[in-house]
Image: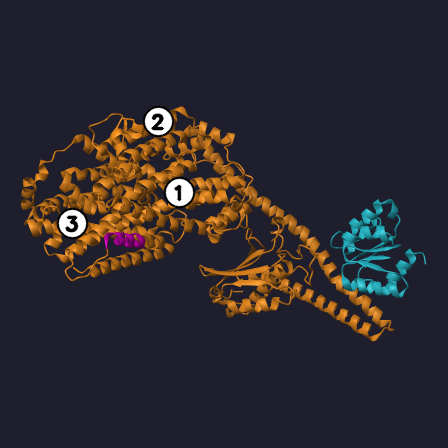
Chain colours: A cyan, B orange
Amino acid sequence: MLLVEDEANIAEAIRFILTRDGWRVSHLADGAEVLALVRRERPDLVILDHMLPGMSGLEILTALRAEPATRALPVMMLTARGRDREAAERAGADRFMSKPFSNAEILAEVRAMMGR
Amino acid sequence: MQFNLLVAACLAYVIILFVVAFMVERRAQHGRLGWLRSPLVYTLSLSIYCTAWTFYGAVGYAARSGLEYLTIYFGPTLVFIGWWWILRKLVRIGRQYRVTSIADLISSRYGKSNTLGVIVTLIAVIATTPYIALQLQSVVLAFGVFATGTPDGVTPPDAASTAIWVAAGLAVFTVLFGTRNLDAREQHHGIVTAIAVEAVVKLVALVAVGAFVVWGIAGGVGQVLARIDAAQLSAWQVQPGRWAGLIALSAMAVITLPRMFQVMVVENDDEGHLARASWAFPAYLMLMSLFIVPIAVIGLERLPPGSNPDMFVLTLPLAEGQGGLAMLAFLGGFSSATSMVIVESIALATMISNHIVIPLWLRLRPAAAGQGEDLRGVVLMARRLAIGGVLALGYGYYQVSGGSAALASIGLIAFLGVAQVLPAMIGGLFWRGATRLGAILGLGTGFAIWAFTSFLPSFGPGAVLSRAVFAEGLFGLHWLRPYGLFGTQAMDPMMHALFWSLVLNALAFCLGSLLSFPGPVERLQGAAFVKVFDGAVGPQRWARGQAEPEALLTMAQRILGEEVALALFQSAAREQGKEGYLPDPTPAFLDALEARLSGSVGAATAHAMISQLVGRATVTVEELMAVASESAHIMEHSAQLEAREAELTRTAGALREANEKLTQLSVQKDAFLSQISHELRTPMTSIRAFSEILTEGDLPPDQVAKYGRIIHDEAKRLTRLLDDLLDLSVLETGTVQLNLGLASLQQMLDTALTAAQQTRPERTFIVQRDLPSEAIYLRTDADRLTQVFINLVSNARKYCDAARPELRIGVRQRAGRVMVDVVDNGTGIPKGSQALIFEKFARLTDANRAGGAGLGLAICREIMANLGGSIVYLPGQGGAAFRVTLPLRLEKAAA
């Protein structure tokens, strides 16, 4: 799965939790490179931060949903601002989590999305 | 008398002048001119009309040609008595349109044409070269008089090296005082006052010699009159034709001589001074000419035959054993020569730099017009070189002409040369139909005929013009002889040149004007000049241009200097109801800017520079309409409407800006809460996630340590954010406790530079500082002020994107306030964002977060407000630039 998060520490934490649970996680900090990487590596799930340099999480999500190949790709959005939820759901996010979250929570959500 | 003593007296005299000029400049800088701007000083400065030609030459003239010398004073007397008709208009136009020289006047009147500026400049330079040579010659002759009377064996240097020393000395003095700064109005109070002092010295000297001759030698007025009667002098006939010609010539010259134009129009502080000068200046001339005839008659009688009558003023007292009086007379002559040369070379240098050097410079480096390079250095250097050049030309003429001709005849040649400008000038002031083509034709014709019939022959037959040309005419055409144009034989050469050059000049000017059609700018300028007293027709107006205010500011800074330009732009912006330094390029603003710039570089160049930025050199239909409708009524009405419209525009501008600000603020208020939420949640997320991981245990120790450190760092970040927020809130509500004390600005800057090195320590910055200017003790809160500096320097370290980053810190003091500019050489902040950067969380890019939450500049702004100062963004400095302004001594507020 692909994790897009520009705060290095948060990225490190999520990566640790998911890797320990047996997932293979690649990480990007810059929004602009996401679309190319998704096309190339075809991840099973994308965890997308809301505020990113280069291209915002919402923009990436809209672009993903516009392409037939990634229209159904499961996407989880993270945000540090409460009121972004509506916009994220309208853009087609499958799950939405606001920071700070508990490790168990995020793990449970990922498992649920991957059907485990 | 010892030659060394004489040289010492000259040097002492020059030093006194220097001190006078220096002190007046100092007073002028502080705006304390007082009586130095009185009609008296103005009148005395006009006396540069009386050069060494008057001082020495008039006596020689009287000895050779009787009362004819008086014609040279009748002309100016008539002009000044009739000041109401011509001089008043000239001075009004000069002041209203900030005319910098006679070339500027002509160029400006005929559609700001630089071609005309160049022509007039060339005529002026060529015509006054003999005149400057004349001054050098008179000083050299005067030294010679003393040298021959040296019994104690001090051999004086020969004439040529005396001339070179005098020319070089005058060049240095003129450069020192004439080109110290670029004044907006091209005024030199120091020089004018020094000239006034010289005027007094030469009057006192000449009157003293005269009094000595009348009462000391001749034995009273009755005796003198009897001797004048007996002398040959009275037998000389008045020649009505020649007299009328010379009176007209001197009347024309007094208006058109570059130095007279400089003191009469450019240096004029108050139009009212003219009224006083209208009788005081003729009175001065009368006093100067009062004793000429007695000195000439007694000189002819007493001195051995063959002695040079041009030097009677010196040789008479010497022959009578009056060494002191001779010395005074020598200083009088020296004054006459130096004052003329100084003002003349300043006037010529202004023309050369404004009409030849700067336009060439701008043409050769067109790209430079919009960039930050300072043009003032170029202008000043051009003027300095021009002054040197003008004096070198004068010296050259002196060498070539052999210094042999009588003083008076050289003077007349120069008079006639500059008088060629008169038809174009008077035509331009009174006749709206006068056109550029007419002016060019008239000037060209007059100049060519003058050169051929008067200037070139003055070098002597066989020097420039061959003997054959004198005898057979140019190309062997009999009617093209220098002294017999078109077969006119019997005329005296001077009158011949005067008649043909001015008649054909005027004819060409009128015909050219009648046969050509004035361009649009020319029509407007013509109307503005001819109707200057009606006040209804303004000068040429700019239509609302596409000029970028920032580019205009950059250009203005190059010419006026950074401080003056910023002040000008700021006040214009305030007038439009805007804050900051960038007013809208309205027609009114562009006009004001052009007027200000033309005070420094001349109308044609200023116009060209603004056109370049506004992107348009033609005139709009509106402007043509404005010319067509001349009815005073319509003009008055439209002026009222315009005033009302300007008022409305100003109010609307202020409202628009206020509204934009409010809208932005309300958006920001919302954004603020959401931002705080984001900024708090981000570190909390890391803390929570890692603390959960740590609680679960089961980790290798090095990872435990790493995660512990992350938690620690993020907790610190959280604390810092809260500190900043609290700081800001305390500062905003004004409840902050200031810790006032005396502190060194230099130390604060040192501390700030050191502290800021923690930000991106891998970057090396070149820091430019001017330590002496920083040696100021401020009464303020040193910690808070340092905090501001740290912030500015850190920001530069963070965001400056230059490959070789540089940081310049400039300190200036004015009126009890200190300004500290912090400028880097990056791309700066885009115009649209300049108003936002001081708002909370207004970090422009996310690229370099480097730990800040975007509160730094907001805190700086609040700190400066609490310290009684301000911090603003300075546009147009070639990088991000901030100006911190604060009071030198902050008093504790009542609260």
* Of callouts 3 and 1, the N-terminal one: 1
Question: How busy is the neighbourhood of tag 2: few (under 14 within 10 Å), some, or many (20 plus)?
Answer: many
Tell me the tag on residue B98. 1
Quadrant of the frame with the N terminus of chain B: bottom left
Lower position in the chain sequence, tag 2 or tag 1: 1
Q: Please say whether residue B536 is visible from this viewpoint.
A: no
> What's the distance in space between the residues labelled 2 and 1, CA to CA?
27 Å
> Quick check: do tags 3 and 1 share a chain?
yes
The amino acid type of the residue labelled 1 equals Arg
Going 61% across and 53% down the picture, which residue do you hit?
Answer: B827
Chain bearing tag 2 is: B
Give SS at disc 2: helix
Q: Label 3: which residue?
A: B313
| Circle 3: residue type | Val
**Mark 2 or mark 1, which is nearer to you?**
2
Q: Are marks 3 and 1 in contact (CB under 8 Å)?
A: no
- Residue to which mark 2 is pinned: B510
What's the magenta region? B158-169
Cα separation, mark 2 vs mark 3, equals 45 Å
Indicate left or right for B355 with A40 as reference: left
Q: Secondary structure at mark 1?
A: loop
Snapshot quadrant of residue B30: bottom left
Q: Residues within 10 Å of mark 1 (few under 14, many from 20)?
A: many
Q: Nearer the viewer, mark 3 or mark 1?
A: 3
> Do pointers 2 and 1 mark residues of a single chain?
yes
Chain to which the residue tagged by mark 1 belongs: B
Where residue B798 appears, x then y in whole percent? 64, 60
Outermost residue toward the top in this view: B515
- Indicate the amino acid at tag 2: Cys
Residue at screen point 14% across, 48% down: B312
